[in-house]
Amino acid sequence: MEIDATVFNPTQHLRDIIRIVLGVDVRNAKSRHRHVVNARMIYAHILHKGGWGYSSIGRAMVKHHATIIHYVKNFDNYLMSDPELRRSYTEIKNSFDGDITDQLYLSEDELKKELILLRKENKSLSLHITNLEEELRSVVYNNKRLKDIYKIVEQRTNIGTEEEVKWAINRMYNGL
């Protein structure tokens, strides 16, 4: 099965996984903290193993290609000596590999089931939106109807006298 580049962007997909797992945006993070550098190294290593060139990875990360060469060249040494890097790499790599398979290689029956579920959810959400719109219209109508009264109360009520005004309005309505 051929992957359509307009539908699936592996660099963005991997960035999203790293952001979720490590909390680091490899494209915009400017820090040299260990966890940020680890995230960049993992990103560069996975893409390089996937056939991406150093310059392409560098453009995706807004880094010079020499930095990417350094990351890829030293990655295995760091991986052997840093258990946190090893754990993060394993989790990200498994997620990256697993997500692609799950999303792109569904059978026709699985796609049909997914479509049916999405249609049901769409109908349910449409009904919910319709109910919320009706509720909003009701609130807006009531606000328009009482807008002038609210404005008078707001303008003439001094700060700290809200409780007295509430009691006065209540007494007034009880007398009507």
Image (spheres, helix red, strand yellow):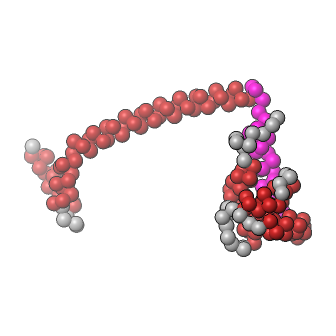
Residue in the foreground of this view, choosing between 82 and 71 = 71
Which residue is depicted at the point 71% across and 56% down? 15
Is 127 situated above or below 93? above
Q: Main secondary structure of the magenta part?
A: helix
Question: Residue 124 appears at what percent x and percent y?
Answer: 52, 31
Residue 42 appearing in the image: no
* Residue found at the very far bottom of the displayed protein: 32
Question: Residue 154 appears at what percent x and percent y?
Answer: 21, 57
Question: Residue 21 appears at what percent x and percent y?
Answer: 71, 57
Is 132 situated above or below 79? above
Residue 116 appearing in the image: yes
Which residue is depicted at the point 70% across and 42% down? 6
Total numbered badges shown on the rendered structure: 0
Is 117 situated above or below 40? above
Q: Quarter-wise, where is residue 107 in the image? A: top right
Which residue is depicted at the point 41% across and 37% down? 132
Q: Locate residue 45 relative to residue 153 in the image: left or right.
A: right
User: Does 85 lie within the magenta span?
Assistant: no
In the picture, which quadrant includes the C terminus? top left
Q: Quarter-wise, where is residue 17 in the image? A: bottom right
Question: Residue 41 appears at what percent x and percent y?
Answer: 80, 64
Q: Quarter-wise, where is residue 40 in the image? A: bottom right
In the picture, which quadrant includes the N terminus? top right
Is 7 situated above or below 66? above
The magenta-colored residue range is 86-109
* Residue found at the very far front of the displayed protein: 55
Which residue is depicted at the point 53% across and 29% down? 123
Residue in the foreground of this view, choosing between 40 and 82 = 40
Residue in the foreground of this view, choosing between 106 and 56 = 56
User: Does 101 lie within the magenta span?
Assistant: yes
